[in-house]
Amino acid sequence: MANQNVHQLVTLIRTHREALLDRWREQVRQLPGAAGLDGPTINDEVPQLLDNLAEALHIGNEVRETNAISAEHGLLRWQAGFDGQRS
């Protein structure tokens, strides 16, 4: 379930990136002294932050899925009588 939620969040960030940035600019322009700032100044590093966030979540999600598969595989092997020790 958690992996699915992370995947949905990554998809949301990537799919709606420009809408998120538009909303960011709207919010920043409401701050005192920021009303007249241009888009690149307001954006600063936020577009890259969104990209990095989506990528980190994606990679982290893949690692969690791999670890879950490894744990399940290990449990099945243990239940089948493998104990990991050689005689």
Image (tube, helix red, strand yellow):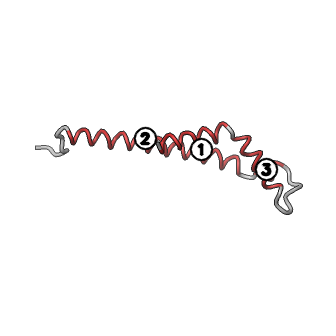
First of labels 1, 2 by sequence position = 1
Using residue 12 as the reference point, say whether residue 27 is left or right of it.
Answer: right
Q: Position of residue 50 (x, y in %)?
A: 65, 47
Crowding around mark 2 (Cα neighbors within 10 Å: few <14, some 14 to 19, many 20+) is some
At x 76% / y 47%, what residue is drawn? 23
Q: What residue type is labelled 2?
A: Glu
For image coordinates 58% across by 41% down, the residue present is 10
19 relative to 87 in the view: left or right: right
Mark earlier in primary sequence (1, 3): 3
| Total residue callouts | 3
Q: Distance between the residues labelled 1 and 3?
A: 19 Å
Image-based side of 36 in relation to 20, left or right: right
CA–CA distance between discs 1 and 2? Answer: 16 Å
Q: Is mark 2 on a helix, strand or loop?
A: helix
User: Identity of the amino acid at label 3?
Assistant: Arg
Residue 1 spot, x, y in % from top left: 46, 42
Q: In the drawing, what numbered circle is on residue 32?
A: none
Q: Nearer the viewer, residue 61 or 2?
A: 2
Circle 1 is placed at which residue position? 54
Q: Residue at x 82, y 60 (%)?
A: 31
Secondary structure at badge 1 equals helix
As drawn, which residue projects farthest toward the right? 36
* Quadrant, the C terminus: top left
- Look at 38% across and 44% down and name the residue there: 67
What residue did someone put label 3 on?
25
Of the numbered discs 2 and 3, the one sitting upstream in the chain is 3
Which numbered circle lies on residue 65?
A: 2
Q: Is 23 in front, or is 41?
A: 23
Mark 1 closeness class: few <14, some 14–19, many ≥20 residues within 10 Å: many
Amino acid type, callout 1: Ala
85 displayed left or right of 38 = left
> How busy is the neighbourhood of tag 3: few (under 14 within 10 Å), some, or many (20 plus)?
many
